[in-house]
């Protein structure tokens, strides 16, 4: 489905409509973490239109295990709560629009993110600039890692070797399904790929604090050279995360613990982590993500931008954010590469681990195929 854009200059713009669509894309291979197993991306696409012909696109995946959101809830909130607040508003009033979205309901970060992304796409199209330029414009090239799902050590070894063969120099190994087994998984992969490939591990809350300390220290003793460990403990256990960070040498990254600017401030004031992972579906979109990055930068803490199992609309938005800011030093934006097909025309260009941001306005996306409109 393609969306033509008509430009009428010199006319005060208003948001005239908001539409939502279902998008279903199969994965190349099942995606497995300690929290879930997924075989397809089942996302909601948002299209915001103005009375002058401009449009903006956004996207949200249902990730109930992390954000608590499912598609029916995402779509219901957008149509029943957010849409009535936005109709008739000036699309350039980003601050006002954010507060309307934020006050439409508590939580529901994925629904808010989809609308936020569409508004930023629309805003940067109006100003005839790629989004990353308006957000800061630090660079237009990024390098992402490749995620290796948690499986048997033998299967993870083969998946890691395939990723390295495809040109990836940064691998993120999913663990969190048995401490001893996890140590073996990482050891087997490290032995297979050698010392020149960077490894980070993500337990997705799969360990208790003492288990995490034991596992990480064992990996340190084995000299497995882990760049960092992402979210080893339960999301709400900030003290447990700090306990781990205080008792290992390997840097600790907060992911599921860190949704909001307030979460970021609390984690960093507690010194509970060394790094943070911003995901637009947790932060509620780009507006709050910018605040989170600013807080992290003020504390001297670097940021990674990641994604859920999303198609290229929202991952392109995340890439624009990552490219805009110097303090965002790492990317985990491989989700589109896990899909069996790409329904999105335009957006970021992916060449193995390399991502190039488009030079055309907004997200640089002109259409999305195979959409089913929700009335």
Image: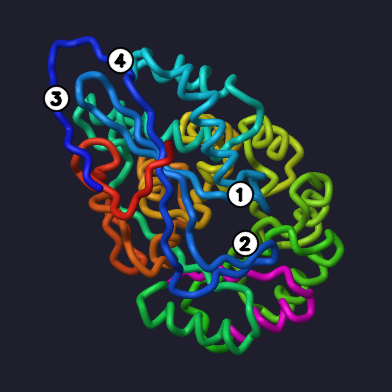
Task: Judge by depth and name the residue closer to the eye, 88 or 95.
Answer: 88
For the record, the magenta segment spans 169-189
**Dot 1 crowding, Cα within 10 Å, few <14, some 14–19, many 20+:** many
**Residue 322 numbered mark, or none:** none
Q: Earlier in the sequence, mark 1 or mark 3?
A: 3
Q: Earlier in the sequence, mark 1 or mark 4?
A: 4
- Name the residue tied to disc 1: 275
- Name the residue tied to disc 4: 14
CA–CA distance in space, label 4 to label 2: 46 Å
CA–CA distance in space, label 1 to label 3: 42 Å
As helix, strand or loop, the secondary structure at mark 4 comes to: loop
CA–CA distance in space, label 1 to label 4: 40 Å
Q: Nearer the viewer, mark 1 or mark 3?
A: 3
Q: Residue at x 51, y 42 (%)?
A: 280
Q: Vertically, is 186 above or below 339?
A: below
- Name the residue tied to disc 2: 228
Q: Position of residue 231 (x, y in %)?
A: 69, 56
- Name the residue tied to disc 3: 7
Location of residue 220 (image quadrant): bottom right
Discs 1, 2 touching: Cβ within 8 Å: yes
Q: Is residue 325 visible?
A: no
Q: Earlier in the sequence, mark 3 or mark 4?
A: 3
Q: Nearer the viewer, mark 4 or mark 2?
A: 4
Q: Quadrant of the C terminus?
A: top left
Q: Earlier in the sequence, mark 4 or mark 2?
A: 4
């Amino acid at each position: 489905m393609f969306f033509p854009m008509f430009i009428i200059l010199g006319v005060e713009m208003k948001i005239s409509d908001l539409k939502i669509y279902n998008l279903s894309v199969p994965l190349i291979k099942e995606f497995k973490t300690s929290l879930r197993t997924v075989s397809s991306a089942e996302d909601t696409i948002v299209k915001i239109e103005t009375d002058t012909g401009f449009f903006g696109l956004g996207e949200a995946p249902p990730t109930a295990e992390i954000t608590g959101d499912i598609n029916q809830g995402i779509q219901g909130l957008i149509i029943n709560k957010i849409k009535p607040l936005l109709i008739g508003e000036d699309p350039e009033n980003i601050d006002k629009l954010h507060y309307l979205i934020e006050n439409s309901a508590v939580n529901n970060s994925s629904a808010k993110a989809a609308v936020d992304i569409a508004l930023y796409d629309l805003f940067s199209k109006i100003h005839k600039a790629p989004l990353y330029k308006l957000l800061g414009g630090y660079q237009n090239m990024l390098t992402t890692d490749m995620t290796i799902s948690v499986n048997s050590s033998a299967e993870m070894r083969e998946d890691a070797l395939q990723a390295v063969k495809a040109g990836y120099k940064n691998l993120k190994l999913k663990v969190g399904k048995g401490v001893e087994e996890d140590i073996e998984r990482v050891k087997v992969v490290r032995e297979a790929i050698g010392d020149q490939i960077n490894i980070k591990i993500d337990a997705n809350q799969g360990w208790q604090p003492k288990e995490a300390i034991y596992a990480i220290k064992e990996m340190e003793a084995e000299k497995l050279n882990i760049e960092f460990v992402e979210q080893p403990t339960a999301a709400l256990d900030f003290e447990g995360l700090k306990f781990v960070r205080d008792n290992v040498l390997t840097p600790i990254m907060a992911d599921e613990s860190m949704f909001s600017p307030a979460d970021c401030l609390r984690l960093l004031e507690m010194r509970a982590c060394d790094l943070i992972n911003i995901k637009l579906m947790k932060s509620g979109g780009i507006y709050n993500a910018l605040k989170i990055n600013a807080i992290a930068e003020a504390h001297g803490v670097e940021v990674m931008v990641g994604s859920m199992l999303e198609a290229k609309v929202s991952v392109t938005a995340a890439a624009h954010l990552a490219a805009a800011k110097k303090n965002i030093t790492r990317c985990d934006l491989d989700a589109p590469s896990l899909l069996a097909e790409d329904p999105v025309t335009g957006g970021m260009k992916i060449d193995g681990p390399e991502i190039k941001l488009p030079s055309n306005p907004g997200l640089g996306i002109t259409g999305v195929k195979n959409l089913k409109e929700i009335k």
